[in-house]
């Protein structure tokens, strides 16, 4: 049995691990995992890299460290083409080596890609926030802006612009990013830059809806809104952001000069999904049936954020790690079932809850129908996260990061590989 | 009193810290520290970043975290010009802002730069090892070579080339680098790449002298040579390396195809030192007198690796952290003395010892005339290093890295900001 898995986020990696576990040792198999990076990224903690709370290295785990079975192989390569008829996947790696892999089963778990508007720019000022590089770049951008602003005169318009940060999108990613920037700016940077006062910094979160965090209930969203307003974050609700010229964000009728815009709105399925000739929904997600099979195929599965998998009411499941992990188990089971010509299982799962960390020891959470907020929700979110981190050495490192963060200022080293 | 300090390695940073400590609060002063990066780099542990033993983030400390005195300022900028006559320093930062600073005293602590030969190259294959970026790039290069070689057929000549690593120079840096590469390759990577065997990897250290480690005694050098030969490192003594074409190292009469050459020989004083019209020795180091004063100036000091400071026998002190730290204290004292028209002190210091970590729980060390090697020297080297790391949070993190390294495989995530 030859299985190719494209992508190794929560969907792809966990599917591979379940296959590894479920396949009896006696069954000859060849499972090939493909991913652009050589590590698994624990995406729920991306914004903690932005805030400097946790180190970049600690939210990633080498994919090869998960491979315990010689039947499972990994290549650092991106899938570029799928020939469904001849069952062949083509992938290229960084050195432009070309891999051609035949498959009996294909699993598409390629995730999403934020669609950022194209902007006039001499230097980067529009930041997506989706992978580790994005998070590290945004962290460095915040540090850079303080460093550069510090050299300018108080009356310089450039200085004000450098210290203005706009976040577009008030979903989980946007709210977490805004509070992450707030926490490093007000908690660590301002005390280290005597020339810059709190009044010099401007932090704006713009959201199209009438309230933020559509994924949570009204009450928790209102709590988060109050908390952000108390914490130096300007909320612009029912607003759209446009970027008419370099270093200028237009929110409603106001022109806001700014050197940093974080774009968290407008995720679509990743490029590859867009290029494949398979049915997709309006957001570019690959349409699959209740068993995870791509429409019109009996050996191609899609799961995780790139897939539109119908829930019992027929609506696609939300693109969250929680769902991807469950789907991965179901798809692994269905591949084995299909291999032994057994009937496939229908996937159904009820979301257990959601947490949104809000920085500085607060969070909002819904868990099994109960709502939590403040310090307890913060503790809860950390506990849930740490349990899901897939390696013990990273769990230990993250707990140490959190502990040191209670005692020492956050590291603000501007590390870059140029 | 206005003091400008160019560079904040061991020399510059410690000079600033001593000034901060020694200057009575009542004395109005303006001490400006300038550095290209916003962090202090603990250079003795650079090769532990190459081997993955310690994380890059843990051997750097934000310079601003050391500034406890409002009279001390920092700018992330590189000095480009000094006008000695008008006592003005010009520096530029990344955004091309120009800083113009007047000084009463100037301290030059700009370090050295490895002079790498110019090579024909489409992609980087010659690696210096001097700053954090270099170390991270080399670490990533080793990971990349394994990743790419894994995709190639056993008989492919490219594969053999990718798995060949040449280190030029058998001083401290060269020996530490070779053993660092050996430890990550044989300790962590080979077990994760079943397709690659120990026989596929070739590691060569070439050194011009008749024995390695000229800084240590014969006995310890012989120990290190034996240890490296036992550990899969080919030693080429009395050899010179040339790089006639891309991916080819020529050692004596042998042409060695290789995708990675680490160049540790040929350090000269940094660019700025070269451009200043001050007396320099044959290695480009700035000639200073016994008090640290640059020849011909009574208000310009130079220290650390960029300075040729005569020891009691008239030979320049070696470029080591140990010496730079002592010189920093002496120069800070002499600036204060000069400010109050007191006589300046002559700097003299006897080296306390030297350690060279050799990977995998062994090291060679000389301490107060005694020689140590093996496990005890390794323990000694770690103890000495950890005491010198200038921040408590990093000390804790490094000890954790070392501890986890005894239990878990090293992290091999290929992290890069592209």
Image (cartoon, coloured by chain):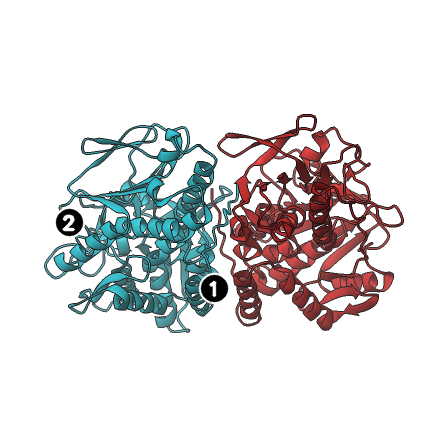
Chain colours: A cyan, B red
In the foreground, B4 or A82: B4
Residue A80 versus residue B204 in the image, above or below: above
Name the residue furthest right. Answer: B313
Q: Chain of mark 1?
A: A
Q: Position of residue B215 (x, y in %)?
A: 81, 55
Q: From the viewer's perspective, is A211 left or right of B320?
A: left
Q: Name the quadrant containing residue B316.
A: top right
Residue A211, numbered circle: 2
Residue A65, numbered circle: 1
Q: Residue at left 33%, top 34%?
A: A258
Q: Chain of mark 2?
A: A
Please tell me whether mark 1 sits on a helix, a strand or a loop.
Answer: helix
Residue A335 versus residue A229 in the image, above or below: below
Name the residue furthest front. Answer: B26
Does residue B66 appear in this view? yes
Residues under numbered marks 1 and 2 in contact, where contact means CB atoms less than 8 Å apart: no
In the foreground, A322 or A279: A322
Q: Residue at left 57%, top 56%?
A: B59
Q: Quadrant of the N terminus of chain A?
A: bottom left
Q: Name which of mark 1 and mark 2 comes first in the sequence.
A: 1
Residue B241, numbered circle: none
């Amino acid at each position: 049995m030859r299985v190719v898995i494209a992508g190794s986020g929560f969907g792809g990696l966990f599917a591979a691990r379940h296959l590894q576990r479920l396949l009896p040792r006696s069954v000859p198999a060849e499972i090939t995992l493909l991913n652009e990076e050589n590590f698994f990224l624990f995406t729920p903690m991306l914004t903690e890299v932005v805030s400097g709370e946790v180190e970049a290295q600690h939210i990633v785990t080498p994919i090869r460290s998960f491979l315990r079975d010689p039947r499972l192989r990994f290549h650092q390569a991106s899938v570029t083409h799928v020939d469904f008829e001849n069952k062949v996947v083509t992938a290229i790696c960084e050195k432009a080596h070309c891999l051609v892999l035949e498959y009996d089963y294909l699993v598409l778990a390629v995730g999403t890609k934020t669609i950022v508007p194209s902007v006039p720019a001499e230097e980067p000022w529009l930041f997506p926030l989706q992978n580790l590089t994005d998070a590290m770049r945004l962290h460095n951008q915040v540090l850079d802006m303080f460093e550069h602003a510090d050299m300018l005169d108080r009356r310089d318009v450039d200085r004000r612009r450098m210290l203005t940060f706009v976040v577009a999108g008030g979903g989980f990613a946007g709210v977490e990013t805004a509070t992450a920037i707030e926490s490093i700016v007000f908690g660590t940077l301002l005390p280290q830059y005597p020339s810059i006062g709190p009044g010099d910094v401007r932090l704006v979160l713009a959201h199209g809806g009438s309230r933020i965090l559509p994924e949570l209930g009204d009450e928790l969203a209102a709590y988060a809104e109050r908390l952000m307003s108390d914490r130096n974050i300007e909320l612009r609700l029912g607003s759209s952001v446009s970027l008419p010229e370099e270093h200028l964000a237009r929110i409603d009728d106001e022109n806001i000069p700014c050197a940093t815009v974080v774009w968290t709105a407008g995720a679509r399925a990743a490029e590859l999904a867009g290029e494949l000739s398979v049915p997709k929904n309006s957001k570019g997600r690959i349409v699959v049936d209740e068993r995870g099979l791509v429409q019109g195929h009996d050996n191609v599965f899609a799961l995780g954020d790139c897939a539109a998998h119908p829930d019992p009411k027929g609506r696609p499941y939300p693109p969250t790690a929680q769902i991807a992990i469950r789907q991965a188990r179901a798809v692994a089971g269905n591949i084995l079932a299909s291999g032994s010509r057994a009937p496939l299982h229908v996937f159904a799962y009820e979301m257990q809850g959601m947490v949104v960390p809000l920085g500085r020891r607060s969070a909002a959470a819904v868990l099994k129908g109960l709502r939590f907020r403040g310090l307890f929700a913060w503790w809860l979110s950390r506990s849930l996260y740490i349990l899901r981190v897939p390696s013990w050495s990273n769990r230990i490192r993250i707990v140490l990061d959190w502990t040191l963060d209670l005692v020492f200022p956050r590291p603000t080293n501007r590390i870059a590989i140029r």
